[in-house]
Image (tube, rainbow, N blue to C red):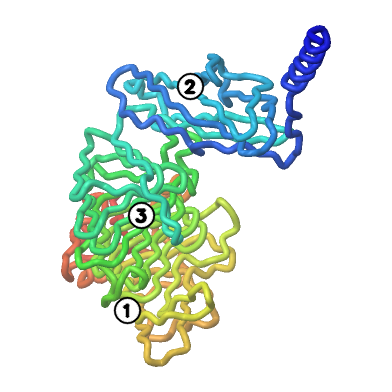
Amino acid sequence: MIRYFLGLTILLFAAFMQSSCRKEAFNESPTAVLNFSVDTVYFDTVFTTLGSVTKRFLVHNKGNQPVKISNISLGGGQGSAFRLNIDGIPGNSAKDVEIASNDSIFIFAEVTINPNNELNPFVVLDSIRFELNGNQQKVMLMAYGRNARFYRPTTFPKNGFPAYSVAECDAHWTKEMPVVIIGYLAVDSACKLTIDAGTQVYLYNNSGIWVYKNGAIEVNGTKEDTVVFQGVRKEDVYKQIAGQWDRIWINQGHATNKINYAVIKNGNIGIQAEYVPELGTGPLGGSLELTNTRIRNMKAFGIYGVNYKMNVAYNNIISNCGTYALALIGGAYNFRHNTIANYWTGSVRTEPSVYLSNGKMNADKTITPYPLEFRFRNGIVYGNKQDGNELEVGKIDDNGVAFDWKFERSLLRLNNEEISQDNPEHFSEMQFNNDPEFQDVFEQLYSLKESSPARNFGNPAFVNSFPPIPEDILGNNRLGDQEPDLGAIEFKP
């Protein structure tokens, strides 16, 4: 009896051991995916010395079968600033990493950067790549490569507004520390962002500055020390590449926004000054004074204004935009001594340099009417659009909505059958289709040659009207001969 019992026990134990040692089959389906606790690992310590920071995240297998990850690797390999520890094993790559069903593993990432090395980019990027059943997934790594003031998103709206962080109320940026923005940086209601002369602002891909309703921005550049808004890439090949960041977006408010002596370059939209009905009601959504500023190499618009007020806009140069250099839908605008020189070469440009309308087309194809008052005086609008036309107007079918626009003492390239050059309601003392003879459009040098027809054609009254602008963007005297030139730059031999 005892011998029978022992034999039965041995058989049962053997069966149990065989069952417990049999592994569950791996999920080999091509639809299997991994889940990650984050999609980007941020190393957000602002380094002041040679620094090393470690972060961790989880890789989840939420399926009911185990998975075998055929390869985990650091995209930059051995040359990367980052290092990995994969499930407790140091190394920048690993093969056949198993995760049980409804289980997870830790990945540790470390970065070492000398923030005082000015050859470093401001943002150092890499990725961790995962290959599961032939499918590729990745988690991004992002660290700060140089000493700067950094902002990255902390709020992620689900209503169509971009992910953003919020600037300190009444933040004040100085040129001693560059600013790097990742995502959108919001200037909140009743707050003001002040930027001193010489400050360098670097914006990451799809990033921007968002001046929320009743907030304000004041950019105090000087002729000798401009404030520059640009992409984060510093290599020479990126100096003239459009679309590296998004835009400066200013909403309605009671405060006056001011931008003086700035360079806004290589984004999607230079300035979007826009009344947004969803943020509240009010007459002429907001106000912007734009002076002595260069906006260039924008993938879409140079300035996009919707129901805004820009009664002070002078000595600005807007150049090389993929669509409109100036698109204004409703509002009140007074441009004096501005140069619009749209020699875009990134693609075939189908839109003219200037678009004016008194109504906005909404997503549902309805139109919101906005009265427009527009004056363009002592200025130049010229470009390389193939059909020779740089002006489009779009009046909505509503006789009760004002559409008051006029060019005076300016040079305009116009070839539009719907717009009569002889209409005194819209044109006064004009030059049409004369090449302004800029110094070098390929190098974006928009001073005038001595033979330019734009020389001595301006009206001194437009120089002296409030506020007077006796000097051009370079500080040259406009009224030495009492015959001011057109545009932002006065001719000097």
Q: Which residue is labeled 3 in the image?
A: 248
Up-down relation of residue 267 to residue 338 (above or below): above
The Cα–Cα distance between marks 3 and 1, rounded to whole angstroms, is: 23 Å
What residue is at 58 percent from the left and 38 percent from the top? 35
Up-down relation of residue 295 to residue 102 (above or below): below
Task: Give the number of marks.
Answer: 3
Q: Which residue is labeled 2 in the image?
A: 82
User: Which residue sits furthest top?
Assistant: 3
The Cα–Cα distance between marks 2 and 3, rounded to whole angstroms, is: 32 Å
**x and y percentages locating residue 213 in the rendered image:** 28, 63
Q: Residues within 10 Å of mark 1 (few under 14, many from 20)?
A: many
In this picture, residue 436 sits left or right of residue 29: left
In-front residue for pair 321/125: 125
In this picture, residue 312 sits left or right of residue 421: left
User: Which residue sits furthest front?
Assistant: 1
User: Which residue sits furthest bottom?
Assistant: 399
In-front residue for pair 423/81: 81
